[in-house]
Every structure is written in C-alpha cells, then in structure tokens.
C-alpha cells in the first residue's frame, strides 16, 4: 500500500490525528514524531522465569495494537521489546527446579513466543536480551562514573540520584517524600537511600557473572533497558511503554540514567503505560490461588478470545479480568465470524474502516472501536453491499486489532483450511452428482463426509456443513 490515504481517507504522515496520553506531562497529546521517516518505540518486556501471566499479556497486546496503528500511519516503525534474562527471580526459579539459568531462560523464552503467537501479537523488530548486551551495559555504567553521575563502593556501582535535578518528574514524586515508604533498597553502601544499583558484584550462589572494571558481577535492573534502548533507538526516541507498575522506580531511573549520560532533554517524548490488572477483583497472586497464565487460559479459550477480552477495557484504566469477560468476548467474536460466514463472496481489500480507526487513533480507544465494529456487524444484514462492508471490517480487525485472523469454518468447527478445501470439493462433487441424477454417488459422498466428522444440510441457499 503506497498511501494510508487510500485506506481511511487521512494522509500517511503529518496531521494523522493520533493522540496518546503522555504520563510524563499528564496530558492527552497529539503524536508528533521526531522523524516521520522512522517511528521508534521501546517497550519493557518480560523477566523470563515463568510462564506469561495474563497481566504480562495485557501489556503485550496493548502495545501490539499501538504498533499496528503506527504501522498503518507510517512507512517505517522500529519496535524494540527487550527480554530480561538475568535476575534474582530467575536464579530462584532455576534453583527450585534444579536446572541451569540458561536452561530455564531458554525454555521460558520459547514458551513466551508460543503464547504471543496464540494472542496474535506481532514479533517486535528487535528483541534484545540482557545477556547479549553486556558490553553496552558496562560501557553505559563507565560513562556515568566518568561524568560523576555514579560512584563505586564495595564492589557496587550506584547511581547518584542527587546528581539529577529532574528526578521524580515522570512519577510526580518529590524526592523528600520518597524516603518514606518508597520502593527503594536500603544499604549502608549507598550515599542516599534513593541511589540505585547499576552494577553488583557476583556472589557465591548466583552462577552467572561478567567481568567488568569493578570486578566480576552483573547489572542492576534499570541500567539494562537504558543501554538496550540506546543501542537500538539512539539517545532520544518517540515512545516508551510498559505497565503502570514500572513508572516508579524503573522508568524514573531509566530517565535519570539516560539523560545523565547523553545530556538530552528527553529519553522518550511519549511515555505510555497500561493500567493494573486484577483477577476477580483481587491482585493476582499465587498465594491467593488466582495466578492465571496465558497457557492455562488457552486450554479453555481461543487466543483471539483472550486478546479481545483484554482490549474491551481501555488500556490506561484498571482492568478486572474474570470468566464473564472471556465469555462476553467469545460471544462477540462468534457474532463477528457469523457475519463473515454468511456472506458468500468476500473480496480482498486493504481498506480500513475510518470510524474504527479514528477510535484507535484517539489514545487507543479499543472499547469504542469494538463497539463501532459490533454496530457495523449489525448493519451487514441491512445492506445490499454486504461483501464490501464485510471485507472492510474483516481487514480492519486483522490489521489494526489483531482479531478475526481465522477462516470462519475453522473458528466454528476447528477445521483447518486444508480440510475445508477438501470439504468444499466434496460438496461441489455432490452437487454435480445430484444434477446428473446420480443419487447413489451423492449419498456416498454424504456418507464419506460423515465418516470424517462432517454433517451436511441442503438449504434454499445451498449446502451448509458443520462438524458432528
């Protein structure tokens, strides 16, 4: 597609109407890229010590929608989603399972990718791992020490928060108030309780370590994202995303590190955060028995159902995830797929429904987009030009929302496309047999289909089929 204008009637670049809520400014803002020839986005990915839970999935799906919207508006979008494969939680999980850290992370990353695929989450353009970027991390820490933003003590390297006057701007926290009840580590080695670790020495229990100017050790959590964002996106980029729980201290510390190193005014121009997710009204916790993984949900529901359920609440709002929302999502998708199934001829199209896209461009208002889609599905039965409307809606769902990617027969019957082609050929053969008054052959084809688990019914609109 040469121009998005041909799809929704708005220019590919410039005044595109995209607005995002910026946590940094606390305002809904028009999106103005640094360079419209390449949009750059970084999103904090998983720490890989266990299966993806539904809270992780919400962030993955939310920023996948933003990625899709950006790709519809701009010719080039570079999306970086990192993987943290060095962490105390990883060590604890590997110890509990009596496996190596490498074995655990490799297995978990593979499962993570499988779950993303089930949720129709597109691959990021870059998926850097901490263990593969240690040189960049060490160089970053060296630069902070050299410019007096960090200090060495007891084999540790700490960032000196007092050296960065803007600390607290993202989280709207006053540094004087942070000493009371803040999520900070207490250590006698630090000059201030707010200072955070950039590098820590290796210990006897943690098997992984890397040589550095301060001895063998491993990085702190916050420095990892700053170093990887710099490597793949440069000093300043357009959008930084993640869960609301990352605003402080993780993203606040990323800003402090990055701006202290590069002297720029901004690490990212737009900071976008998805809201907290609860399960049946309670915070998800293994101790409460309400810890829900994507793998568990996919045993009961199609990945598209889970994805739609996650999109029915605005990304920035808190979300209560419960079985009723999954059933509601399934019913919606059943109705949408029925609308497609009942239209005999659907023409391929690149057109995107303008009303739906406007909702998505308005700070990713997926609930409104879903409502508009549902209303337009109701209109399908009222219009003569069903094929054109269905084609546009189906393409909009697939391209912008990552939904309705399946063939309707596969959705309802669990029949793969290859099987569907065979069924259609048999039904066509049976039609010809009946026209030739070869009813014995027609009955034999019906029996053959039934033996393969397919029941057929002759109607005034033709022969329809379903699984037995």
Image: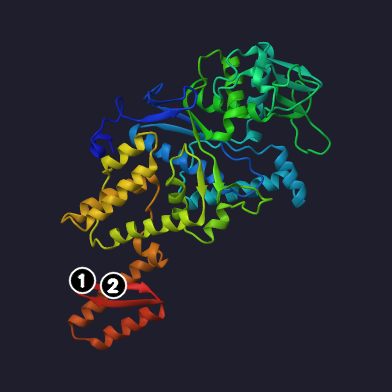
Instruction: Pinpoint residue 216: horizontal percent, then vertical percent.
Output: 78, 28
Where does the N terminus fall, quadrant-wise? Answer: top left
The residue carrying mark 2 is 464
Q: Residue at x 35, y 43 (%)?
A: 368
Could you say whether the residue bearing mark 2 is in a helix, strand or loop?
Answer: strand
Count of residue discs: 2
| Residue at the far right in the pictured view | 204
Residue farthest bottom in this picture: 440
Inter-mark Cα distance, 1 to 2: 8 Å
Name which quarter of the figure residue 199 lies in: top right
- In the image: residue 115, left or right of residue 5: right
Observer-nearest residue: 413 or 283?
Answer: 283
| Tag 1 residue | 461
Judged from the image, the secondary structure of the residue bearing numbered disc 1 is loop
Residue 24 horizontal/vertical position (percent): 49, 23
Q: Is residue 287 left or right of residue 274?
A: right
Compared to 198, does 411 lie above or below? below
Quadrant showing the C terminus: bottom left
Q: Position of residue 105 (x, y in %)?
A: 66, 45
Name the one closer to the observer, 214 or 390.
Answer: 390
The image quadrant that residue 160 belongs to is top right
Disc 2 crowd, CA 10 A, few/some/many (<14, 14-19, 20+): few
Residue located 39% across and 50% down the image: 403
The answer to whether 316 is drawn above or below residue 461 in the figure is: above
Question: Quick check: marks 1 and 2 in contact, CB under 8 Å?
Answer: yes
Q: How is the image coloured?
A: rainbow
Which residue shows up at 47% across the image and 53% down it? Answer: 306
């Amino acid at each position: 597609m040469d121009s998005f204008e041909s799809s929704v009637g708005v220019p590919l670049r410039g005044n595109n109407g995209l607005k995002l809520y910026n946590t940094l400014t606390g305002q809904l803002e028009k999106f103005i890229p640094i360079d419209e020839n390449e949009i750059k986005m970084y999103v904090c990915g998983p720490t890989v010590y266990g299966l993806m839970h539904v809270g992780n999935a919400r962030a993955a799906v939310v920023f996948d929608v933003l990625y899709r919207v950006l790709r519809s508006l701009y010719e080039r979008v570079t999306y970086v989603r990192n993987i943290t494969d060095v962490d105390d939680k990883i060590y604890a999980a590997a110890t509990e399972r009596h496996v190596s850290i490498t074995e655990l992370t490799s297995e978990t990353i593979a499962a993570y990718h499988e779950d993303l695929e089930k949720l129709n989450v597109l691959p990021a353009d870059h998926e850097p791992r901490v263990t593969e970027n240690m040189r960049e991390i060490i160089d970053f820490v060296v630069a902070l020490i050299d410019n007096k933003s960090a200090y060495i003590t007891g084999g540790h390297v700490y960032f000196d928060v007092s050296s960065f006057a803007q600390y607290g701007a993202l989280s709207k926290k006053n540094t004087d108030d942070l000493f009371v009840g803040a999520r900070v580590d207490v250590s006698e080695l630090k000059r201030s309780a707010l200072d955070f670790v950039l590098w820590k020495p290796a210990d006897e229990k943690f098997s992984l370590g890397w040589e550095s100017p301060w001895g063998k050790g491993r990085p702190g959590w916050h420095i990892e994202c700053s170093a990887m964002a710099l490597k793949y996106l440069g000093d300043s980029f357009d959008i930084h995303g993640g869960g609301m729980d990352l605003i402080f201290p993780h993203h606040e510390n990323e800003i402090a590190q990055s701006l202290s190193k590069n002297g720029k005014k901004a690490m990212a121009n737009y900071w976008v955060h998805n809201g907290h997710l609860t399960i049946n009204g309670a915070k998800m916790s293994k101790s409460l028995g309400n810890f829900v993984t994507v793998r568990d949900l996919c045993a009961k529901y199609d990945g598209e159902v889970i994805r739609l359920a996650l999109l029915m609440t605005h990304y920035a709002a808190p979300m209560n995830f419960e079985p009723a929302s999954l059933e509601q999502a399934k019913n919606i998708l059943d109705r949408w797929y029925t609308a497609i199934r009942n239209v005999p001829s659907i023409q391929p199209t690149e057109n995107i429904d303008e009303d739906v896209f406007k909702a998505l461009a308005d700070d990713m208002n997926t609930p409104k987009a879903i409502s508009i889609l549902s209303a337009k599905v109701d209109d399908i039965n009222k219009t003569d030009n069903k094929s054109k409307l269905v084609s546009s809606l189906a393409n909009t769902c697939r391209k912008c929302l990552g939904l309705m990617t399946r063939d309707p027969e596969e959705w309802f019957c669990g029949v793969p496309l290859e099987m569907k082609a065979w069924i259609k050929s048999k039904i066509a053969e049976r039609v010809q047999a009946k026209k030739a008054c070869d009813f014995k052959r027609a009955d034999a084809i019906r029996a053959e289909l039934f033996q393969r688990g397919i029941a057929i019914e002759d109607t005034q609109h033709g022969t329809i089929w379903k699984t037995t």
